[in-house]
Image: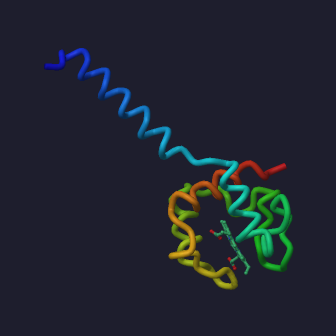
Amino acid sequence: MMTLRKQAAAFVLGLLCTQAGLAASVVDGQRIYNQYCIGCHGPGGNSAIPNAPHFSRGERLMQPDMMLLMTIKSGKMMMPSFNGILRDQEILDVIAYLRTLQR
Ligand code: HEC
């Protein structure tokens, strides 16, 4: 039988692994951005079309990840919905990447 200390250690380890699994990946985010977003939001977040925010200037990024996630999933005006195209984790990866673009 496991001692209480071993159980506690296993519990903490589990928590750490879960956190690591949920952590957004900027590297994956960049790959996804270059595939799905760059056409409008431009290389490095310098918008390529009128009306699309410049992430290089931090535009529209002053909101929580969960708000951005909802907007990207549902789409907005000229921006298509990515619901069913990208998984939530992938969208969170892209958001992490967007947050690195501000100059
Ligand atoms: C077809 C062009 C197009 C594509 C592709 C596109 N966007 Fe957009 N996006 C826009 C436009 C235009 C807006 C501004 C919408 C508005 O407010 O009128 C926008 C707005 C946004 C916003 C700001 C939302 C807000 O709260 O106002 C975010 C964040 C965003 N896009 C992220 C992304 C991501 C991430 C991708 C790729 C997965 C992506 N976009 C793909 C055109 C596009």
**Count of numbered labels shown in the rendering:** 0
Horizontal and vertical percent position of residue 28: 66, 53
Residue 75 is drawn in which quadrant? Answer: bottom right
Q: Which quarter of the frame holds ligand 1?
A: bottom right
Depth order, front residue of 39/71: 39
Please tell me in which quadrant of the rendered image residue 73 appears: bottom right
In the rendered structure, the answer to whether residue 100 lies left or right of residue 28 reads: right
Q: Is residue 7 left or right of residue 65?
A: left
Q: Quarter holding the N terminus?
A: top left
Q: Position of residue 77 (x, y in %)?
A: 65, 84
Q: Residue at x 78, y 52 (%)?
A: 101
Compare residues 62 and 70 and report the one nearer the observer: 70
Which residue reaches farthest left? 1
- Position in image of residue 25 (x %, y %): 62, 47
Quarter-of-image position of residue 94: bottom right
Side of 64 relative to 57 (left or right): left
* In the depicted structure, whether residue 38 falls above or below residue 44: below
